[in-house]
Image (spheres, rainbow, N blue to C red):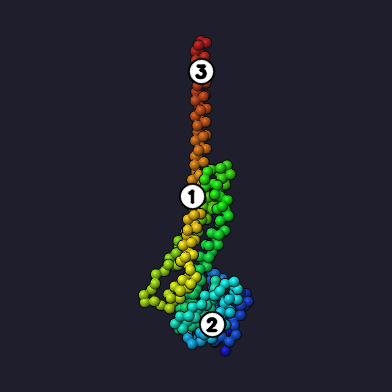
């Protein structure tokens, strides 16, 4: 018997992805927020994992044919994960804990992927702004606001990554739990720690450029003010000299 129950209602996304036939009663489909993916929860005995694996993996990989699903089998619990879809099959007493661990990992992975995409999108502007990091130019002076915006954006990404880092580098629990081991193994299989380190290195490079750009713009504005001040002093001295000459001429004429 197939329990085709939807966990979150009649959303168009869920309706477009039907629950596979032949799954145990009580199987339900949930919408994963905020990532927007789908999660299939299957109450099943530990011995049913081998039978369910090909069917669930085929359903999960329908969400994105370019991504190979991560498959974990742990203490009678089966977790199949991709960024868009995941499936969890476990005994009823473990199902919710395993699903929560998979959901927390999905949220962490989605946030890291969003940061990586933003970094990738920042590289063209980085290349275009390289001359402004060496010396102030008229063009760079006119683009100071845009440079400041890109600096703020890169710092915001660094802040998001710093807040995400504790979730990626979670210490191991002793004694370990099913949920902690699911999260640990998913993070390891998807190389979240390495990806976080790469993203941090890239952001450091980007931020260093825009800090240099900010310093050049600040130096340019300061030099411009000094230039104006110098001319003001020159004009005042010239005016004072002219007044002295007028006084001398007036005194000589008198």
Q: Nearer the viewer, residue 8 or 203?
A: 203
* SS assignment at label 2: helix
Find the distance from the CA under tag 2 to the CA under tag 3: 101 Å
Q: Assess disc 1: are there few (<14), some (14-19) or many (≥20) residues with their C-alpha within 10 Å of its C-alpha.
A: some
Q: Assess disc 3: are there few (<14), some (14-19) or many (≥20) residues with their C-alpha within 10 Å of its C-alpha.
A: few
Residue 126 higher or lower than 74, as above or below: above
Does the residue at mark 1 contact the one at mark 2 (Cβ under 8 Å)?
no
Residue for badge 1 = 211
Residue 165 picture quarter: bottom left
Q: Position of residue 169 (x, y in %)?
A: 42, 67
Residue for badge 2 = 53
Does the residue at mark 3 contact the one at mark 1 (Cβ under 8 Å)?
no
Residue for badge 3 = 245
* Residue depicted at x 51% and y 50%: 210
Q: Nearer the viewer, residue 13 or 206?
A: 206
Closest to the camera, between mark 3 and mark 1, is 1
């Amino acid at each position: 018997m197939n329990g085709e129950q939807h966990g979150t209602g009649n959303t168009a996304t869920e309706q477009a992805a039907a629950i596979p036939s032949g799954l145990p009663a009580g199987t339900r489909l949930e919408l994963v927020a905020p990532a927007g993916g789908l999660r299939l929860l299957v109450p099943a005995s530990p011995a049913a994992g081998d039978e369910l694996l090909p069917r669930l993996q085929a359903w999960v990989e329908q969400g994105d044919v370019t991504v190979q699903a991560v498959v974990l089998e742990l203490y009678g619990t089966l977790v199949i994960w991709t960024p868009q879809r995941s499936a969890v099959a476990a005994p009823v007493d473990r199902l919710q804990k395993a699903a929560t661990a998979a959901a927390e990992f999905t949220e962490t992975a989605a946030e890291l992927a969003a940061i990586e995409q933003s970094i990738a999108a920042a590289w063209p502007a980085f290349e275009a702004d390289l001359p402004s990091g060496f010396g102030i130019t008229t063009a760079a002076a006119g683009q100071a606001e845009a440079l400041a915006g890109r600096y703020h954006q890169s710092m915001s990404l660094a802040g998001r990554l710093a807040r995400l880092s504790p979730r990626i580098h979670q210490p191991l629990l002793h004694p370990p739990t099913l949920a902690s081991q699911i999260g640990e193994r998913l993070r390891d299989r998807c190389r979240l720690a390495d990806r976080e380190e790469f993203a941090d290195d890239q952001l450091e490079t980007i931020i260093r450029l825009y800090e240099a750009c900010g310093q050049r713009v600040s130096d340019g504005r300061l030099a411009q003010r000094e230039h104006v001040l110098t001319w003001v002093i020159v004009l005042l001295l010239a005016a004072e000299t002219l007044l002295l000459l007028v006084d001398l001429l007036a005194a000589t004429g008198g």
